[in-house]
Amino acid sequence: MENLQLSVIAPAYNEVDNVQPLVERIGQVFGPLNLRFEAIIVDDASTDGTREKLLELAGQYPWLRVVTLAKNSGQTAAMDAGFRAARGEVWGTVDADMQNDPGEIPRLMAMLSDNVDMVNGWRKKRSDNALRLIQTKIANGIRNWISEENIQDSACSLKVYKRECLEGLTLYKGMHRFFPTLVKMRGYQVIEVPVSHNPRLHGVTKYKFGSRVIRAFIDLLAVRWMKKRQLRYSASEITPAAAPVPGRQTGTHTGVKLSVQSPSSTGA
């Protein structure tokens, strides 16, 4: 199978009116580029016809793949299913509600380098109501305080990763909010850049602040525990000294040393 340069991954739950504009936008952006790509939209057991609409679109766009969950399992599970199916060297993620613009993915991809492994989108100017903006500001402040982070918008779905940042990572419910921290804990470099944020034109948000705040706080404590308990050490392999040569001093240990160090939380 031909290697792909990019996998665009989007979780979708009851977004029947948004998936077609999303797929069409992906085609407009990446179709003209000299880029081998695929789009993977993961249906989280929608009940509004999203799955059927995606299958219809997959018949029109050969680069579109549809992954479906047997039962509604949440955003982290949908993201994980998309990651496991992805074949690209780079992964770009967006929400299916079209508040993220897939057209920004090429700009973020261009920022990847030997020193940058993940680019996290920051919705600096959000198109949300005043109450939602206040809730988000509080949530981000608490998240950074407890997790000892400085990420402005950890929960923004518009992100670009080198494949190795997340490949093989075991995820748990709610962990999609902490991808920058999890990636940095694996020793990779993360930067954050402002991205656009558009008003929702169709459907309703699935975010309910009151019902999720307790679960999100528990997840945050789990991430803090992981950071505090992360292994950090240095080790070297040593060998016995060589047989002494007459007239020459030898040290206690000689030989080639192998340095081993666990990944540290580096990056932005």
Image (cartoon, rainbow, N blue to C red):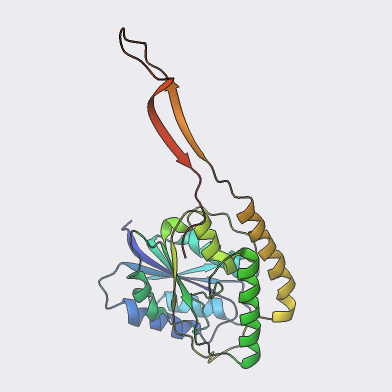
**In the rendered image of this protein, does residue 57 appear above or below residue 220?**
below
Where does the image place residue 212, in percent across and percent down from the top left?
A: 71, 75
**In the rendered image of this protein, does residue 89 appear above or below residue 103?**
above
* Residue shown at the point (47%, 65%) measured from the top left: 268
Residue 47 lies in quadrant: bottom right
Identify the image quadrant of the N terminus: bottom left
Looking at the image, can residue 64 be seen? yes
Q: Nearer the viewer, residue 55 or 99?
A: 99
Where does the image place residue 40, in percent across and percent down from the top left?
A: 46, 69
Residue 154 lies in quadrant: bottom right
Where does the image place residue 201, in percent across and percent down from the top left?
A: 53, 92
* Residue shown at the point (64%, 50%) measured from the top left: 229
* Residue shown at the point (60%, 80%) measured from the top left: 14
Looking at the image, can residue 73 be seen? no
The mark tally for this picture is 0
**In the rendered image of this protein, does residue 151 appear above or below residue 165?**
below
Residue 25 lies in quadrant: bottom left
**In the rendered image of this protein, does residue 174 appear above or below residue 134?**
above
Where does the image place residue 214, in percent across and percent down from the top left?
A: 74, 71
Compared across the picture, whether 31 is left or right of 197 comes to left
Give the residue at the far left of this rendering: 34
Q: Nearer the viewer, residue 226 or 61?
A: 226
